[in-house]
Amino acid sequence: MLLSSEELLRQLTEAIGPSGQEDEVRNLLRSQVSGWTERCYTDVLGNLFCEQGSDKPGPRVMLDAHMDEVALMVVHAEDNGLLKFRAIGGIDPRVLVAKPVYVGAQRLPGVIGAKPVHLQTASERRKPLNIEQLYIDIGARSKEDALSHVQLGDAAVFATRFGILGDGCVKAKSLDNRAGCAVLCEILRIPAETPRIGVFTVQEEVGLRGAAVAAYRVAPDLAITLETTVCADVTDVPGHGQGTVLGGGPALTVQDGQTLANQQFLAFAVRTAERFQIPYQFRRVKGGTNNFAAIQRSRAGVIGGSVSIPVRYLHAPVQVMALQDYHNTVRLVQAMLHELAEGGWPL
Amino acid sequence: MKELIMELAACVAPAGREDVLHAVLTQHLANCADDIQTDVLGNLIARKHGQGQHVALVAHADEAGVMAMHADDEGFVRLTAIGDVRPACLPGQTVQFCNGVMAVIGAEARSKTTEVGWAQLFADIGACSQAEALARLPIGTAGVVWAPVQPLSEHRLGGRAVAQRTACAVVIEAFRALANAGRQVSAVFTAQQTVGARGARTAAYNLQPELTLVVGAAPAGDTPEGPRMALRLGAGPALKVMDGTLLTPARVLRHLADCAERCAVPVQYEVWPGGQTDAGVFQWTTGGRWVGGVSCPARMVSGSVSVVDVRDAAAAVRVLTEAVGSYA
């Protein structure tokens, strides 16, 4: 069944997809796009490729969106049945304590716990809890009991339900980057005017690994990464620290931790947004990066860039996004693809 | 040589905006190269087809700089780094942006000198409002510290980007000599080296040379309480033994040393464990490649100004010309 934008976002963000274990997300995406693609296949790492418009003239465009999310990996069961874990991808340990999680593909409920505050030493109270001081409690009574339910290597994700906030915002886990996946889904449902390859990539959060392999396979003429990005327009943050503003439109990168924007692509994106009267903003922060860094450096170099939806509280258990930014991102990417087909930027 | 270095060092080409340098490079290469191309990352590659195996001479074109990231209601612009630029060194400096806009750099009054980070710095471009600032200096505009290169003595030059542009001049001169002698050779002016050898990746994949000789600047240790490097200015080019990306294969290092001896050029040896260069990327491309390096010693190489001795550069040209010409 074809899902609406909101329902697509709900199902994608409630699906489980830690880096390296993206199966559930990939299966959901395949069910949503396979009817619209000429060829739909995976590679060794688990990237999902969706080819369209191979008989059309024009540049071969790769559209990338990573499927994976930051998560926790169970690495040890204590004698008392509590589970020790490590982070998969970049997680601020301060967001973890007292959060409900699901462990493993079977969604075993658990809670992240720590020694109670009245038993902490004075020096422990002054510092935030680190990962070594935390554990996942699945209600097991012993090591044997715990290991009869989970395996070491199982991943735990935040047990967050998707929901609507106020008038036009959504809250969910893993909007980074299921929102980008949803944008790519919606784009793939629009008839292709040029050859294009949508790629839902794996293992972005652990080092842009899926995208590096996918870009080498596709060898595109142009690539666009569909992402979410830091949005810190909150209390006590000066204008020059905010990165992006919620509701300000899709964000274009000028420089991030691993990419200097291609000047022609940036000018093309701005020109297109202005022609179609789509709001946009620049990502006004340097830290962090996304898959385009790996794609750009593939083979003899790939032209392109990224279009990102502002999301507050990235990598945290609950993230917030404005639906208006989401829809404007779909519009901008669609407009850019149309301009490419019309020769608006001859490659 | 001196004039060429000064001409190249006058170009403002922070990483990502190497295009500013391309016109000047092309002008010096056009009459001896078979073709000159730029690629997606911003590398400029000149090729000459001829005798012998394909050898590439590599120097990075880019330099570290700053980028406009935000403008506030009063028209003050906030900056971030392109590559390795220390924010604490910037207050009181002048910055020249690629579009010609000039700025003076200040720090928030309540910040301590030692603790100045990007969040405390601002650029004053003389704008009176956010709209005026953004119109003149769009977000993403790149710039460099304004410190034009100057002759300091008969043989020595000091100023912004002089170390790196000396390497570019060496590659130009060596390429011209080799191309005019009918030798197969490429000159590669890589982009985005200062932000992590990004251009080198795609250039190496594209060219796949038999041998790559990376020409750069290595820190001289001859300044007061200088860095722990056994290199002196004016004591000859440095043959790269190792940097942070490459251990030069003994075969290549011996070839370079033999060539220097044949040219009667005194050389020094570069052992620079922390050096981040393009060399390793060329070695690792497409199954592994032969790579070596010849560097010109430069003082204060990681600062906003550096000092070189033109005699080291001229001698480097002779060693490189012999090394490529006699490479079997």
Image (cartoon, coloured by chain):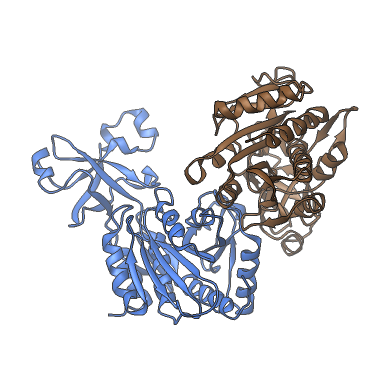
Q: Residue at x 30, y 35 (%)?
A: A132
Horizontal side of residue A45 vs A296, given as left or right? left
Picture coordinates of residue A142 (x, y %)?
Answer: 10, 39
> Taking A284 as reference, is A134 above or below it?
above
Q: Position of residue A292 (x, y in %)?
A: 51, 57
Q: Is residue B186 visible?
A: no
Q: Which is nearer the eye, B272 or A72?
A: B272
State which chain is coloured brown. B
- Position of A285 with respect to A29 (left or right) is right
x 28%, y 47%: residue: A98
User: Which residue is farthest right?
Assistant: B154
Rendered-image quadrant of the C terminus of chain A: bottom right
- Indicate the quadrant where residue A40 lies: bottom left
Q: Colour of chain A?
A: blue
> Residue B102: percent from the left, percent from the top?
81, 51
Which quadrant of the structure image shows residue B195?
A: top right
Residue B144 against residue B299 in the figure, above or below: below
